[in-house]
Amino acid sequence: MAELETGPVAAEMMKRLRVALSPTRLELVDDSASHRGHAGHDGRGESHFTLLIESPAFAGLNRVARQRLVNRALAELLVERVHALAITARAPGE
Amino acid sequence: MTEEVNARIGEIVRGNDVVLFMKGSALFPQCGFSARAIAILDRLGVEPHTVDVLQDPEVRAGIKAYSDWPTIPQLYIDGEFVGGSDIMMEMYEAGELGELLASKAKA
């Protein structure tokens, strides 16, 4: 499993996703540097992420339901800390 | 969330074929994700009814509870929540959004 990011927010996001969804693939990229100076970038970094997650939990679910599982796992992190998260959620074999 | 905001959002999404809750306006989106949502709809020839949540803090908070979705933009078609900008892009690329919106495009 790829460990592309080691910041504390990213680490917490990865931990929660692993616990909630037992992913077979998990890649989280911190895009914050490219958003420096615009709305939502508060200077702390770790504000903008791109996530690729593959999990058996997504099998048979539509896109909205899949993303809701991710959103629930991240809960208040998404509201209070992470300004933007682009999500690709797949089931194994897709 | 107050009942009042809930009712107001319900009226908006039921009263318009295609509704986009976004940051900024269609002409001047204030967020990259909202800009992308507008660009996708524009490509499909659809002019959504837009609601700028930055101008309306009640709706900004209320829409997240209404749809059980924590982020903006949010697309509604025929009163149904479709998704945010990632889902819009995936559906656009798969041709599904075009199908869903075929009857809504401007002549």
Image (cartoon, coloured by chain):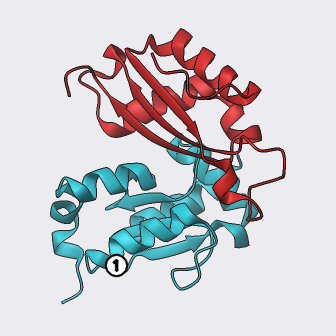
Chain colours: A red, B cyan
Along the line of sight, the residue nearer the viewer: A89 or B62: A89
Question: Which picture quadrant has residue A38?
Answer: bottom right
Residue at image location 46% in from the left, 15% down from the top: A21
Q: Position of residue B86 (x, y in %)?
A: 41, 50
Q: Quadrant of the C terminus of chain B?
A: bottom left
Q: Is residue A50 toward the left or the right of residue B18 in the image? A: right
Q: Confirm whether residue A32 shows in the render.
A: yes
Q: Amino acid at mark 1?
A: Asp
Q: Position of residue A25 (x, y in %)?
A: 39, 20
Secondary structure under tag 1 reads helix
Residue at image location 34% in from the left, 56% down from the top: B89
Q: Position of residue B2 (x, y in %)?
A: 71, 49
In the displayed structure, B28 sits above or below A44; it is below
Residue linked to disc 1: B42
In the displayed structure, A49 sits above or below B98; it is above
Q: Is residue B65 toward the left or the right of residue A58 in the image? A: right
The chain under label 1 reads: B
Q: Is residue A91 toward the left or the right of residue A28 in the image? A: left
Question: Which picture quadrant has residue B59?
Answer: bottom right
Query: Count of labels shown?
Result: 1
Q: Residues within 10 Å of mark 1 (few under 14, many from 20)?
A: some
Q: Confirm whether residue B4 shows in the render.
A: no
Q: Position of residue B51 (x, y in %)?
A: 56, 71
* Outermost right residue: A43
Along the line of sight, the residue nearer the viewer: B96 or A86: A86
Q: Is residue B42 toward the left or the right of residue A82 in the image? A: left
Along the line of sight, the residue nearer the viewer: B66 or A60: A60
